Image (cartoon, helix red, strand yellow):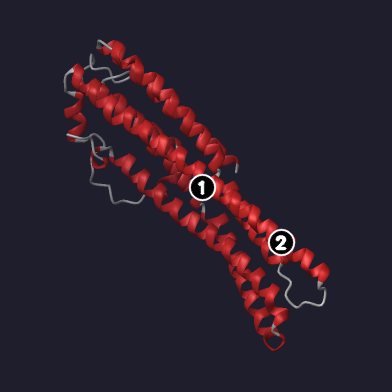
Amino acid sequence: MKFEHSDYPALFRAADVASLKAQRTYLRLTKDSLMLLVAGAGLAAVSSAFESAKPAFAIASAVLLALALVLTTYLKTSKLDQIWYGGRAVAESVKSMTWRYLAGADPYSVGSAAAEADKKFLLELGSIVKERKQLAFGFGGEFAQEPHISQRMRELRGMSFEERKSTYVTERILDQRRWYGNQAASNRSRENKYFIAIVISQLFALVTAIALVRWPESNLKLTGLFTSLASAVMAWLQMKQHKELAQSYSVAEIELGFIQDQAQHVVNDRDLSDFVGDAENAISREHTLWVARRDKS
């Protein structure tokens, strides 16, 4: 039976949901803010072509720019980005701990008593909460009644060595490699599309600038519009960091592949513990770099 999302500790699920909600809201509001800026610049650019409606265009442009300012201010004060990054850090830390626990790897060795492993696992969860207690307000209470050690976690941990090894390789390493590979390809594709959009916007800005030199009496002054559009796409691309993510995901996928190839040499619980430790360290390293990049952006 596959290890489902609902089988993870309540803390993971709460942090995961909070992070995803904050991410979606933050990205949507950021995109809306950039679109409002471009729309405001567009109205200002075409207003000269409609002399009778020029005041209306000016007012509409000002309203759009004011709304963009409100959204930008809200994004700065709402701390949505902190819930996004911090919640993801908590979720990934708990996820890594969970797989160590399931596989019976250090520090939750299958050689130790079940009560001792459970106690150590719960203490580690408590330490994570203390380190990130400023995020607790964003986690909500929908998982307040859920356990931190699910029945499915206990069942997998109680399986034989071969079953635990097979489950870890299939549902953790292969699943993570597949995710990294898909994300790397997706980010490369998006980076290329946004780059093309930037080049096209800049090309139109150049063409309209040259057109104004040729026809200075023209009422259509679109250079500012296309310049704003290019700047908005560049800002979006910088925030999303598609190129950096594609590279880091590719490296992580390759590294996990090297680790997976060592699975055939894992013949006992001590080997499995080292194997799991290497894999989780590789995954944690990639995520730590992701958080560091986000904090700097």
- The answer to whether residue 162 is above or below residue 194 is above
**Which comes before the other along the chain, label 1 or label 2?**
1
Residue drawn at 60 percent across, 51 percent down: 196
Residue 221 sits in quarter:
bottom right
- Image coordinates of residue 170 in percent, x first then y, are 27, 28
Q: CA distance from mark 1 to mark 2?
A: 22 Å
In the rendered image, residue 60, in percent from the top left (x then y), is placed at 62, 78
Is 281 situated above or below 212? above
Q: Given the image, on which type of amino acid does mark 1 rest?
A: Arg
* Residue at disc 1, secondary structure: helix
Q: Is residue 108 something that shows in the picture?
A: yes
Q: Is residue 274 above or below residue 85?
A: above
How many neighbours does mark 2 have within 10 angstroms: few (below 14), some (14-19), or many (20 or more)? many
Give the residue number, with chain letter if any, for mark 1.
190
Q: For the N terminus, which image quadrant?
A: top left
Per the image, the residue denoted by label 2 is 205
Q: Quadrant of the C terminus?
A: top right
Residue at x 46% of width, y 37% of height? 184
Tag on residue 257? Answer: none
Q: Looking at the picture, which amino acid does disc 2 mark?
A: Ala
Q: Regarding mark 2 in the picture, which secondary structure is present there?
A: helix
For this rendering, which residue is in front, 258 or 137?
258
Residue 54 placed where, x, y %? 70, 83
Label 1: few (<14), some (14–19) or many (≥20) C-alpha neighbours in 10 Å: some
